[in-house]
Amino acid sequence: MERKILLKQLHDGLRQYFPAALWQGSSQRREIALTFDAGPNDQETPELLTLLDQYRVTATFFHVGVRAAAAPRLVKQVTAAGHQIGLHGYEHQSFLFKDSATLCQELAESQRLLAEASGRSQTAFNAVRPPFGHFTPAILQTLNDTGYLPTMWSLVPFHWLQSAEATVRQVITGVDNGAIIVFHEGLPGPNVAKLTATILPQLLAEGYRFVTIHEMWANLQRNMP
């Protein structure tokens, strides 16, 4: 319980000091954004698509540019299923080691690859989650100035470091209105699709609705004074 309180205090502090990024949706809406980083992945992406279709749940996949280029079929399947795709860098590298021009060039190339694979406009892929959560105020300013939506999270279960039971418990006890949950594709540990299959029915039974990051941004902006 003490660890949970400390993490919430840290999260609230980050939200206060970096309001230009999305850390959580509305506390007044019983909705959750379920997100998957670091794909597409040949095994886990198809499993997740089948599962999400079974529960009629939409999610947001933050793809890595070079991985999307290697698996355009999966990119097309994700978008065809009605899910959002965001950017997780061109390669899974920290943004801290890139100057603004390089970062923008790589993000634009990732957008081009995703648009080519999906048949959608490049501007559809404007949500950005920095790999490892690494950012600075200058990076956030660059993303905002160039039309991107910097997107963080409220709940990251360390599923690659712990048991399935611990991860499920961390999500179920830590979730609340407006939560942004992050899972990762292609990491060691329990299968992500199986974890999601355990968590989804419990959250649906509690009355949560699942939305994309774009929907969460739009709902927040709609309620701004």
Image (cartoon, rainbow, N blue to C red):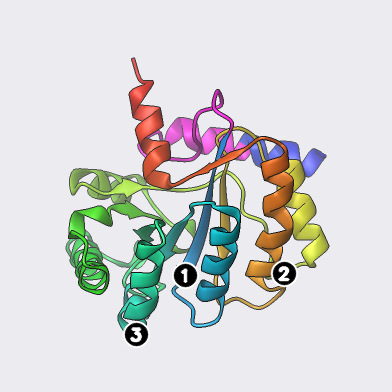
Give the residue at mark 1: 38
Q: Residue at x 43, y 38 (%)?
A: 216
Q: Nearer the viewer, mark 1 or mark 2?
A: 1
Q: Nearer the viewer, mark 3 or mark 2?
A: 3
Query: Does the stretch in magenta take in 26?
Result: yes
Give the residue at mark 3: 70
In three-dimensional space, the C-alpha distance between marks 1 and 3, rounded to whole angstroms, equals 13 Å
Q: In the picture provided, is 61 more to the left or to the right than 127?
A: right
- Which amino acid, by three-letter code, is at mark 2? Leu
Query: Does the stretch in magenta take in 163?
Result: no
Pointer 1 and pointer 3: residues touching (CB < 8 Å)? no
Which residues, given as a range, are shown in magenta? 10-30
**Residue 37 in sight from this viewpoint:** yes
Q: Residue at x 46, y 72 (%)?
A: 39
- Dividing the picture into quadrants, the one containing residue 218 is top left
**Residue 64 in sight from this viewpoint:** no
Give the residue at mark 2: 161
Instruction: Tell me the crowding category of disc 3: few under 14, some 14 to 19, or many 20 or more residues within 10 angstroms, Cα based.
Output: some
Q: Nearer the viewer, mark 1 or mark 3?
A: 3
Q: In terms of sequence position, does the residue under pointer 1 or pointer 2 come before the other?
A: 1
Q: Residue at x 82, y 39 (%)?
A: 1
Place of residue 45 in the rendered image (x, y in percent of width and height, measured from the top left): 51, 73
- Which amino acid, by three-letter code, is at mark 3? Ala
Q: In the picture provided, is 172 more to the left or to the right than 73?
A: right
Place of residue 93 in the rendered image (x, y in percent of width and height, measured from the top left): 40, 71
Q: In terms of sequence position, does the residue under pointer 3 or pointer 2 come before the other?
A: 3
In what element is the residue under mark 1? Answer: strand
